[in-house]
Amino acid sequence: MSAPKETRPMRLKALCLAIASLLLASASLATPARAQIEIDVNKGDVQPLPIAVPAFGGTRGADISQVITGNLERSGLFAPINPAAFIEKGLDVAVQPRFPDWKAINAQALVNGQVTVEGGRLRVDFRLWDVYSEQQLLGLQFTSTPENWRRVAHKISDAVYERLTGEKGYFDTRIVFVSETGGRLNRTKTLAIMDQDGANPSYLTDGSYIVMSPRFSATSQEITYMTLRPEGSAIYLFNLETARRESIGKFPGMVYAPRFSPDGGRVAFSVERGGNSDIYVMNLKSRTSARLTSDPGIDTSASFSPDGTKIVFNSDRGGSPQLYIMNSDGSGVRRISYGSGRYTTPVWSPVGDFIAFTKQTGGEFHIGVMRPDGSDERLLTTSYLDESPTWAPNGRVLMFSRETQGGPPRLWTVDVTGRILRAAPYPGSGSDPAWSPLLN
Amino acid sequence: MSFSTKHALRLALVTTAALSMAACASRPKPGPGVGPGPGPGYPSQPGPGPSTGNVVPGSIQDFVINIGDRVYFDFDRYDIRSDASPVLDAQAQWLVRYPSVAVRIEGNADERGTREYNLALGARRANSVREYLVSRGVSPARISTVSFGKERPIDPGTSEEAYQRNRNGHTAITGGAR
């Protein structure tokens, strides 16, 4: 099967990241305690940390700094300082910065670096400094092929984010989504992929049929999605490195809503037959399927817990769509959502602490989160139509799609506290985003 | 359905028919039975519009214009409404009269729901239409179903009337018509 001409194999070659920890200031790194500057990502009312990211020296140095600045700014946790205010110029990674110059512009953290090209390889050395304690917090070196400079910038962003927040970063990741073009009556839906910052967008289908529900495997090299044609629907697996595409097989009715298990070995999905939708799971090695639900309600949008032992899904078996959890063999079903409104598209956080969902109340839609036992429900967003939440791999940021009344869908992000809400850096119209795990 | 709703709905139908014809003029013609097509007309009330004079009996045009190829549903419901029964009765009679015709029932939902749930809801609607036609004597082997969820609206609006238009079951002829 597959139509190779419409695919463009992704260039995701091994980005050989020789992470040499230089540990110049081993004292500050050896102690597990964080530096004086730190950010609590779970406290949404935190003041963004003023950070200075002067242009790195060498080829692509300014571009790399710009990508890092953009990443940190969009997280909402950092306030990059305008380079026009910088006093010290031409920093050298081998020399301590002049801290008073950075204190004078209220920078609390400073990231500087140097790019060198050696034997066709790009080497980037960078330092993260705590300006007030005058300590080096990080000193790392990344090497890669020159065309992968953006990924190096994302890796550095992740290192800085992790060092200052204590949480894993999420910048060296990609988003697979449905690009939408055309009017409301003749919309073209194309499977697309881009870096999380909107760079390097490319298309994986030709737009001649509807695509929906793309999802990443935890290995990140494979996605699953569904296609919808007048003749019916199908679920595909698509390897991003080899561009190999295959259907998971024929079923008696419609198949939709595919989701990988965390180990990538199974796919949960819905099968519709005679108007009734139930959840099935397929073992991708043996290609055998098991039916997990069998009641007359709509059971769909299954999502595995990070340990793979449970599945959250939505069902209208109780009269209106609500969230339910079951064991991954279909046993032990129990309802977890009890608020007023309609709950759909549950997505288990990759770190396990929350389940995100779409909630419809009256004339509005919300992205919300609750604990896996249904407690602590919080609505993070409100609009005419918000839906399709997907978690960043650190479980602290969600991307979703938003439609204003009569407008095209756009991608947005919100942090888990609901206070940092942003349009995602993708200029076009898109829906159904899915966030990759961190790339290797 | 109250008189005023019905009236508003009919106005919406006319508007949409005009819109979809305009859309057809500017892009490749969709294949038979695919896409929204012209708005439905009730068999007893053909209303203004294309003359039925030169419509070939047993053709797709005959079905769409003289029978009506779409029935409507209430929000989050999939039971056949009383105003849909006469249309489906006429569809069944027509299909019994032209036994070589095969149809695909396409279930559609409005945008006030999430994508996957709406796919499931559209499938329920398509199945309701299918079961109704089968109960009126149409062989199940002639009927396939698909759900487009909210992916194929026929009305671009965001009013309650537009939502109502987009909650439908569309009977598309896939083969065997004259």
Image (spheres, coloured by chain):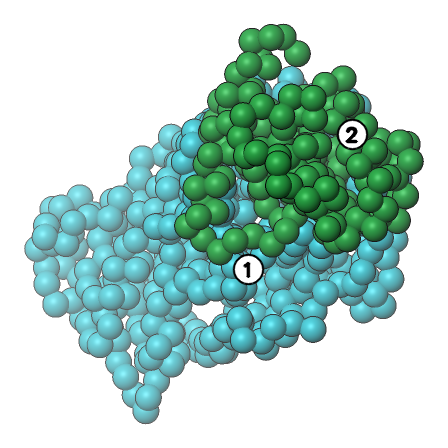
Please state the horizontal and vertical placement of residue A178, each as a whole percent of the image. 51, 52
Residue A283 in sight in this render: yes
Q: Quadrant of the N terminus of chain B?
A: top right
Q: In front of the other: label 2 or label 1?
A: 2
Tell me the residue at 77%/34% (across/down).
B91
Q: In which quarter of the image is residue A48?
A: top left
What's the residue type where badge 2 is placed?
Ala
The residues bearing labels 2 and 1 have C-alpha atoms spaced at a distance of 34 Å
Say above or below: A255 vs A58. above
Say above or below: A366 vs A172. above
Tell me the residue at 47%/28% (across/down).
B15
Asked which secondary structure carries label 1, the reply is: loop
Please state the horizontal and vertical placement of residue B120, each as a whole percent of the image. 72, 38
Q: Colour of chain A?
A: cyan
Say above or below: A410 vs A130. above
Asked which secondary structure carries label 2, the reply is: helix
Which of the labelled discs sits on residue A208, or is there none?
1
Task: Name the one closer to the observer, A417 or A431.
Answer: A431
Dot 1 falls on which chain?
A
What's the residue type where badge 1 is placed?
Ser
Q: Chain B is drawn in which colour?
A: green
Which of the labelled discs sits on residue B90, or is there none?
2
